[in-house]
Amino acid sequence: MDNKNGISEYPNTAAIIRQLDDLIKQPIYTIKPEALTAYEQQYYEKKCAKSKAMIQEAVHVIPGGVQHNLAFNHPFPLVFTKAEGAYLYDIDGNQYYDFLQAGGPTVLGSNPIHVRSKVIELLNDCGPSTGLFHEYEYKLAKKIADHIESVEMFRMLGSGTEACMAAIRVARLATKKKHIIKMGGAYHGWSDQLAYGIRIPGSKWTQAHGVPRHMFKYTQEFYPGDLKDLERKLRFNRLRGGTAAVLIEPVGPESGTRPLEFDFNKGVEELCRKYGALLVFDEVVTAFRIGMSGAQGYFGVSPDLTVFGKVVAGGYPGAGGLGGKKQYMKYLSAGLGSGDKHKRALVGGTMAANPLSCVAGYYTLDEMERTNAVQRAGIMGDKLTSGLKALIEKHKLPFVAFNQGSICHLETVGTLHYAIDWSKPWRIPGVLKATSERKKEMEHMGAAYMAEGIVTLAGSRLYTSAAYTDEMIDDVLVRFDRVFGQVAIKA
Ligand SMILES: Cc1ncc(COP(=O)(O)O)c(C=O)c1O
């Protein structure tokens, strides 16, 4: 493995898909009710009293009691007050191993001193924002362009959601075509036209509550990993306005929860060239986690546009941006522009590209380069995953563990492995019922992990960071062993 990539060996996708297919045919295996009750009473009630009290108050002023979709957990959310390296601490003083990693951005681990001290220096000098140009806007853009070959220019925005929106506008201006195609199940933020086919492939608009159906007039999804289905849609669109962009999460929908064959991205690139659509890689999770040259460097693909988020601000706010070839990025020109006469996409954001996000992003990438963080985080991901596989075997469970470097998946119920097939509409209610029942059990497993001092992403994904050590992962596996030892078929 060179120092650019975090994946030591690409997972055997076909074998994983087979295992996931089997998993959803099995009854639900989950934490035994008496074990869950014991965690609730012995851990949450006794050791998390301050969290409980705060959430009981917060629920009166914050809808649902928390501000973040990933923060909710059974039986109540915990309040975190300290983050350091691989550890998190709650308001009651309990310590946890952090595999949520703020949802992905902290590849270096939480709150690294090297980044923090530069942020404090900047705050002392100019504060977080001025609304004017700052040297770190340039430095961050240059660093990203130096690492990622297809990125000649970069424009910082406020979030991954905004960057996906900008990508679509640029693609439409550049190609003068209308349709956008995404992979079923993939998440590209929560903007209106991309709230389509999210989580469950084939779910179309059904998860997009609050979005009028006509918003999806030009949005389509194709079945994950299915190049034939993608080509069918590209061909069909030729007759009705053309396809402006194909958006891809390069390791697969939901950060690779449904993994793709290694050659898939190359196939999408060829189809985009054939049909004149721009290839947009959504590297919000993968850029600077899969490799310093992005997932595109790893897969050897050259997208037209790349969406960034998370790591580009190193866990600080304002993490988003769009990068790509000059001929497309010109549509985002602000200020002096490029000299050409052309329309400019409408983008904005008072707080986008503020000095705080840019300095944090710059020194995060700088420190990652210096310490080879992507590779170190990937090695920890490998160790965690192989340990989980051994435990699954030991306890004879149908669970599936796999990883793409530091993105680790532990599928206990396979909620995201379902798909909706509209040619068999009578099956749809059953799929929705099964996924919601399974999701509940995933939350119960997540509650058990949390009580054992392990913070996961929704009970099924674990991001590792460069702050982990072999000893920590060994300790984490002992805790997983305890949870797996209390699992049985749901009665
Ligand atoms: C692949 C992908 N794209 C886009 C987004 C949206 O980014 P943000 O939460 O910064 O809006 C996310 C967020 O998790 C993501 O995982």
Image (tube, rainbow, N blue to C red):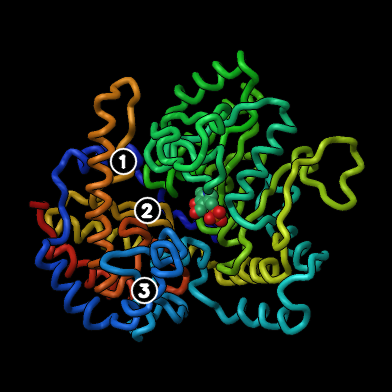
- Displayed quadrant of residue 460: bottom left
Q: Is residue 316 above or below residue 419?
A: below
**Amino acid tagged 2:** Asn
Q: Counting residues from the N terminus, which is met first, the one under dot 3 or under dot 2?
A: 3
Q: Counting residues from the N terminus, which is met first, the one under dot 1 or under dot 3?
A: 3
Q: Is residue 67 left or right of residue 432?
A: right
Please state the horizontal and vertical placement of residue 233, each as a whole percent of the image: 51, 21
Q: Which mark is residue 417?
A: 1
According to the image, label 3 marks what residue? Answer: 55
Q: Residue at x 41, y 47 (%)?
A: 256
Q: Nearer the viewer, mark 1 or mark 2?
A: 1
Determine the secondary structure under disc 2.
strand
**Amino acid tagged 3:** Ile
Please state the horizontal and vertical placement of residue 278, each as a whole percent of the image: 65, 33
**Which sits in the foreground, 341 or 255?**
341
Q: Nearer the viewer, mark 3 or mark 2?
A: 3
Q: Label 1 crowding class (10 Å Cα cut-off): few <14, some 14-19, many 20+?
A: some
Q: CA distance from mark 1 to mark 3?
A: 32 Å
**Amino acid tagged 1:** His
- Is residue 84 something that shows in the picture? yes
**Contact (CB < 8 A) between labels 1 and 2?**
no
Q: Counting residues from the N terminus, which is met first, the one under dot 1 or under dot 2?
A: 2
